[in-house]
Amino acid sequence: MEEQSISTKEIAENIAQISQGVGEVNENVAQSSSVAGEITQSIGEVNQSAGEMASSSSQVRLSAEDLSQLAEKLNIMVGRFKV
């Protein structure tokens, strides 16, 4: 009877340790999930910024092309006024 009591106590202690270990694992998984969510949000923000930069770069390229054409026209006009 005493051996059964000791065995039961050991089993209960083992179950308590396992339960604590599972709790720690759950906490770690929750923290990992939170970090993954933050990373996902950051990636979304970087993606949005990259899209805005691409759009701005296209606008700068178009402005540079317009400026180049204007410079060509101005050069032709100035060439007409040479003495």
Image: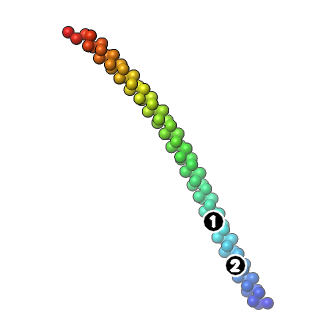
Provide residue 79's location: percent of width, then percent of height.
26, 13
Residue occupying image coordinates x 59% and y 58%? 32
Q: Amino acid at mark 1?
A: Val
Viewer-nearest of discs 1 and 2:
1
Q: Amino acid at mark 2?
A: Glu
The residue beneath circle 1 is 25
Structural crowding at the residue carrying mark 1, measured as other residues with C-alpha within 10 Å and reported as few (<14), some (14–19) or many (≥20): few
**Disc 1 + disc 2, Cβ < 8 Å:** no
Provide residue 70's location: percent of width, then percent of height.
36, 19
Residue occupying image coordinates x 45% and y 30%? 58
Tell me which corner region of the image, top left, top right, bottom left or bottom right, holds residue 71: top left
Q: Secondary structure at mark 2?
A: helix
Q: Nearer the viewer, residue 50 or 27?
A: 50
Provide residue 19's location: percent of width, then percent of height.
69, 71
Task: Give the vertical position of 57 relative to 79 (above or below).
Answer: below
Q: Nearer the viewer, residue 53 or 2?
A: 53
Q: Quadrant of the C terminus?
A: top left
Task: Give the vertical position of 72 relative to 81 (above or below).
Answer: below
Structural crowding at the residue carrying mark 2, measured as other residues with C-alpha within 10 Å and reported as few (<14), some (14–19) or many (≥20): few
Number of numbered discs visible in the structure rendering: 2
In the displayed structure, does residue 12 sit left or right of residue 39?
right
Task: Give the vertical position of 31 relative to 59 (above or below).
Answer: below
Q: Quadrant of the N terminus?
A: bottom right
Tell me which corner region of the image, top left, top right, bottom left or bottom right, holds residue 13: bottom right
Residue occupying image coordinates x 47% and y 35%? 54
Residue occupying image coordinates x 41% and y 25%? 63
The residue beneath circle 2 is 13
In the displayed structure, does residue 55 sit left or right of residue 83?
right
**Residue located farthest toward the right when viewing the structure as drawn:** 1
